[in-house]
Image (cartoon, rainbow, N blue to C red):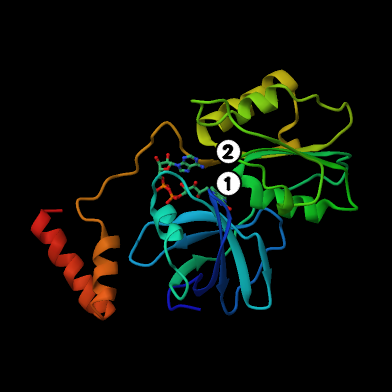
């Protein structure tokens, strides 16, 4: 465990391509304790960055755990996971979780885009033998059929539409019996879905968990005058120490007036 409380250093031991947009990263880490809740996630900080991004713990076993990362057109983790990252040391937070199915649930419905598929898969595995599960998953290209065994309906968003998971939910039929609905996707659509479930479907709030996983519409995070990523990579390539690299970064920020 690193010196900062509640964070762990983890080393990338494997990187596998699942599809053109989906990359598996296997990490070795000491002391990580799972919550046991199937949608658990960690905050990931990749080398040379301060900002974190959240990723679901797809699986964990004996000092290794797996994150499955969607690569977008651009992005901080996207760029890192698209390159050769085996051997890199990353930082992860302690896990958090949200899924909370009531004891009296007689059905479980799951909807997500590709970023939610790791959680959907873990929830399906957890629910096996407890409650019947159906899932609807939107992917940017081909379905990832081998990823999980279960009743999964695959779709892609119509051409020119960033994501259409809200339309999937509007077409669902809702059983009369008590159950649980879990969903993850683009944040603005998730806000609309919560309203739909509350006002139109009249589900009690304990019967659903709808999570905003990312912000669409070309949303840009706060830009920085100096990006530490390239400075970090150039410093590493030149064999510099971490202290030397951060000194280069401070000098570049000073020069830019940041
Ligand atoms: C609890 C939780 C668990 C998550 N689990 C996973 C997981 O297991 N796997 C996973 O891949 N993601 C997961 N996410 C989503 C992930 O954190 C975001 O997609 C994140 O923004 C990706 O970071 P990035 O550095 O690649 O791109 P950013 O630097 O954050 O964004 C770059 C650009 O990409 C766009 N963008 C970001 N996400 C998407 C997207 N999904 N589709 C299209 N455009 C997008 C942004 O709008 C922005 O314009 C999870 C999120 C949460 C909150």
- From this view, report whether residue 166 is shown above or below residue 220: above
Seen in the image, is 199 located left or right of residue 127? left
- From this view, report whether residue 129 is shown above or below residue 195: below
Of residues 219 and 209, the one drawn nearer to the viewer in this rendering: 219
- From this view, report whether residue 87 is shown above or below residue 79: below
Residue 190 visible in the current orientation? yes
Kindly indicate the quadrant of the structure image that contains residue 220: top left
**Secondary element at image label 2:** strand
Of residues 56 and 199, the one drawn nearer to the viewer in this rendering: 56
**Residue 75 percent location from the top left of the image:** 39, 49
Seen in the image, is 119 located left or right of residue 15? right
Residue at the spot of label 1: 115
**Residue 190 percent location from the top left of the image:** 58, 32
**Secondary element at image label 1:** helix
Of residues 225 and 161, the one drawn nearer to the viewer in this rendering: 161
Query: Which residue shows up at 34% across the image and 43% down it?
Result: 221
Residue 98 visible in the current orientation? no
Asked if disc 2 and disc 1 are in contact, CB closer than 8 Å, the reply is yes
Query: Which residue shows up at 14% across the image and 62% down it?
Result: 252
* Ligand 1 within 8 Å, label 1 CB: yes
Other residues around mark 1 within 10 Å, as few (<14) / some (14–19) / many (≥20): many
Other residues around mark 2 within 10 Å, as few (<14) / some (14–19) / many (≥20): many
* Ligand 1 within 8 Å, label 2 CB: no
Query: Which residue shows up at 80% across the image and 51% down it?
Result: 149
Badge number at residue 15: none
Residue at the spot of label 2: 185
**Residue 49 percent location from the top left of the image:** 34, 62
């Amino acid at each position: 465990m690193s010196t900062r409380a509640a964070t762990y250093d983890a080393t990338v031991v494997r990187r596998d391509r699942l599809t053109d947009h989906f990359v598996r990263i296997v990490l070795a880490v000491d002391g990580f304790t799972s919550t046991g809740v199937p949608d658990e996630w960690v905050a990931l900080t990749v080398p040379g960055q301060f900002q974190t991004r959240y990723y679901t713990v797809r699986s964990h076993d004996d000092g290794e755990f797996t994150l499955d990362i969607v690569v977008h057109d651009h992005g901080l983790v996207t760029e890192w996971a698209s390159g050769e990252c085996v051997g890199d040391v990353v930082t992860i937070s302690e896990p958090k979780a949200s899924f909370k199915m009531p004891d009296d649930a007689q059905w479980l419905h799951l909807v997500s885009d590709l970023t939610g598929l790791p959680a959907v898969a873990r929830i399906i595995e957890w629910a096996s033998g407890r409650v019947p599960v159906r899932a609807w998953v939107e992917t940017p290209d081909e379905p990832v059929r081998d990823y999980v065994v279960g009743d999964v309906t695959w779709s892609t968003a119509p051409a020119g539409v960033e994501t259409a998971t809200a339309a999937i939910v509007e077409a669902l039929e809702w059983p009369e019996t008590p159950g649980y609905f879990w969903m993850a996707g683009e944040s603005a659509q998730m806000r609309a879905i919560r309203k739909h479930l509350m006002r139109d479907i009249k589900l009690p709030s304990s019967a659903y968990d709808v999570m905003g996983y990312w912000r669409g519409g070309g949303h840009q995070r706060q830009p920085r005058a100096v990006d530490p990523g390239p400075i970090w990579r150039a410093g590493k390539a030149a064999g510099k120490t971490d202290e030397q690299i951060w000194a280069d970064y401070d000098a570049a920020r000073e020069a830019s007036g940041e």
